[in-house]
Image (cartoon, helix red, strand yellow):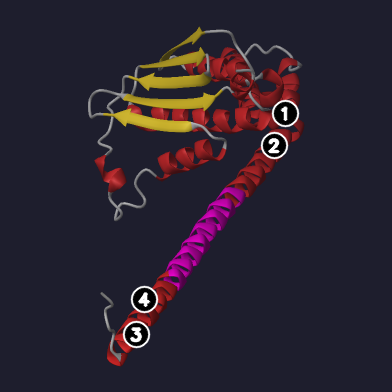
Amino acid sequence: MLIQISEAGYYLIGATVFFSILFLAFFIFFKKVMQKQNNMLLHEQKMQSQFSQTLLQTQLEIQEQTLKNISQEIHDNIGQALSLAKLNLNTMPPTNDEALQQKILYSKELVSKAITDLRDLSRSLDTDYIQEMGLQRVIEYELEIIRKTGTVETNMVVEGSMFRVEKHKELILFRIIQETLNNILKHAGAKSIHVNITYSAAFTLSIKDDGKGANLDPLSEEKNNNFGLGIRNMHSRAKLIGADFSLTSQPGKGTEVKIVLPNERKNENK
């Protein structure tokens, strides 16, 4: 039995097909526009991330060059001036004035200590020295300097077979470690610092102290932009070289900083 379709029915079918095609075209157009906007947003975010990393890298390069210049200035000028002062003190003739003689001996000790302290400072600032010695050795050196002050006990445990990471990454890691140690000495009131280094599928370093600790909750509050700025800077530096940075602390229970940098060479050989 044939079904008769009226002229109005044809118009209705045609209108339905037309609006279906129109709706489909609009949907495809809308989807492409949204996809384009998402791609533009992702591209903008990527460019912003690259810009931030480039800016941070530039800041670090400028900082390292400045520290290197200061190190050279200490060695070439201040260190030599103190060495000359020590030489002059050593060539002073003995005197019968016991009080004056004691002052001369004390001055010699002060100058000798200043020379040693400046030499230690110069090495800590010198980029070439740090890269030449390697990260593990310069960490040991920093802990040795702290231990010599007699105020804080330090120790370091190393596990696994040592490997070197790229020099620029070692340098950034060392600056993060330096800042951590300085924060402990300035703010923690700690009696001991324990450093643990593990070489495996990653270079893992932890720095623990037994100081007063801190409440880290304010770090997540936007209004406290000034709180933990140093921590955020360390986190940004770690991120720049592909390392994970974490900090845990509780009031009265000390603080631990942990850095994990994947061993790219070992992972490439898998």
Cα separation, mark 4 vs mark 1, equals: 71 Å
Q: Earlier in the sequence, mark 4 or mark 3?
A: 3
On residue 68, the disc is 2
Q: Earlier in the sequence, mark 2 or mark 3?
A: 3
User: Per the image, is 32 magenta?
Assistant: yes
Cα separation, mark 4 vs mark 3, equals: 8 Å
Q: Are marks 2 and 3 in contact (CB under 8 Å)?
A: no
Cα separation, mark 3 vs mark 1, equals: 78 Å
Cα separation, mark 2 vs mark 4, equals: 71 Å
The residue type indicated by label 2 comes to Lys
Q: Earlier in the sequence, mark 4 or mark 1?
A: 4
Highlighted range, magenta: 28-54
Q: Which residue is mark 3?
A: 15
**Element type where label 2 sits in the image:** helix
Which of pointers 2 and 4 indicates the residue nearer the eye? 4
Q: Position of residue 154 (x, y in %)?
A: 44, 13
The residue type indicated by label 4 comes to Ser
